């Protein structure tokens, strides 16, 4: 694996972006395997960067190996996940644009939509500026919503993995700061609520609730609403419903 020296990046590496930002001092790199991260770490250090052990406030949710270099440049190296939870999904990999091979390193550039999603889970002030820039480039919200759906197992959602909710918070910040309007914000909120309801219902089933009235009583939700959630879980193959007698019996698959 090889990495060019910092002094040559701006002139010889058009892969740093699509020409949509005037300049950048930060590079985010994602690899899939731990040993790849170790090799990349050695290469980045060999290019003149040093590991930055500081955890400044803007990096509150960054779990990367952070390297600081000349002229204030910074490289963040993630392995497998971003901010300790957001997974480099198969969809993200398939949408990424192949840039080229550099020694033993094959480099791809994430799609605008996936960069939009990735930046929604960080707490660096400048990332909000990048998000609005991407939004103004007419990104495809269908890809973003699909990217959210691909994140997190249902069992993990109550632990904070509802990515539609993360993105909704960031979009509201963007709307306030830049006075823009995101037409698909309502749809995003509805999808976040649906995920939350599925996670809550599944949790009650795991705790022993096996009927719609029983789940509705525990969650203080209407039976029709719980029934709709159970139907979605059944369609997705997560639960089975025994309709031999009433009330129907629900079980986790």
Image (cartoon, rainbow, N blue to C red):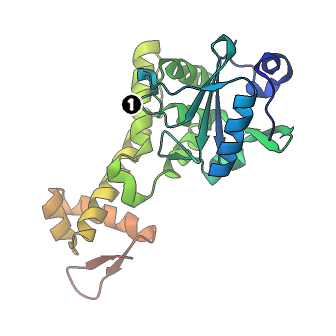
Where on the picture, by quarter, is residue 143?
top right
Dot 1 alpha-carbon crowd within 10 angstroms: few under 14, some 14 to 19, many 20 or more: some
Query: Compared with residue 66, is residue 143 higher up or lower down, i.e. above or below?
Result: below
Q: Nearer the viewer, residue 129 or 74?
A: 74
Q: Nearer the viewer, residue 182 or 74?
A: 74
Where on the picture, by quarter, is residue 40?
top right
Q: Nearer the viewer, residue 40 or 120?
A: 40
User: Is 218 displayed left or right of 168 in the figure?
Assistant: left
The residue carrying mark 1 is 169
User: Is 250 displayed left or right of 101 in the figure?
Assistant: left
User: Is 218 displayed left or right of 189 in the figure?
Assistant: left
At a point 59% along the width and 20% down the height, the residue shown is: 133
Query: Compared with residue 87, is residue 127 higher up or lower down, i.e. above or below?
Result: above
Residue 113 lies, in percent from the top left, at: 61, 36
> Please, what secondary structure does the residue beneath circle 1 have?
helix
At a point 50% along the width and 50% down the height, the residue shown is: 151
Residue 142 lies, in percent from the top left, at: 57, 42
Residue 240 lies, in percent from the top left, at: 37, 77
Residue 200 lies, in percent from the top left, at: 27, 57
Residue 33 shows up from this direction: no
Residue 40 shows up from this direction: yes
Looking at the rendered image, the quarter that the C terminus falls into is bottom left
Query: Compared with residue 192, is residue 29 higher up or lower down, i.e. above or below?
Result: above
């Amino acid at each position: 694996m090889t990495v060019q020296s910092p002094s040559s990046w701006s002139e010889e590496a058009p892969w740093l972006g699509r020409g949509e930002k005037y300049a950048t001092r930060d590079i985010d790199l994602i690899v899939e395997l731990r040993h790849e991260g170790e090799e990349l770490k050695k290469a980045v250090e060999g290019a003149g960067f040093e590991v930055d052990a500081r955890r400044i406030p803007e990096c509150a949710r960054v779990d990367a190996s952070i390297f600081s270099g000349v002229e204030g440049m910074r490289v963040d190296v993630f392995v497998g996940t971003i901010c300790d939870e957001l997974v480099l999904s198969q969809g993200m990999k398939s949408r990424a644009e192949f840039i080229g091979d550099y020694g033993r390193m094959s480099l791809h550039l994430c799609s605008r939509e996936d960069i939009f999603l990735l930046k929604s889970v960080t707490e660096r002030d400048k990332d909000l500026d990048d998000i609005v820039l991407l939004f103004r480039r007419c990104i495809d919200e269908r890809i973003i919503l699909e990217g959210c759906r691909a994140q997190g197992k249902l069992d993990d959602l109550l632990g904070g993995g509802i990515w539609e909710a993360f993105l909704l918070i960031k979009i509201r910040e963007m709307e306030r700061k830049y006075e823009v309007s995101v037409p698909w914000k309502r749809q995003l909120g509805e999808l976040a609520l649906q995920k939350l309801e599925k996670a809550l219902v599944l949790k009650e089933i795991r705790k022993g609730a096996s009927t719609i009235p029983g789940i509705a009583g525990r969650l203080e939700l209407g039976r029709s609403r719980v029934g709709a959630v159970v139907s979605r879980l059944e369609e997705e193959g997560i639960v089975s419903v025994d309709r031999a007698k009433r009330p129907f019996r629900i079980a986790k698959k």
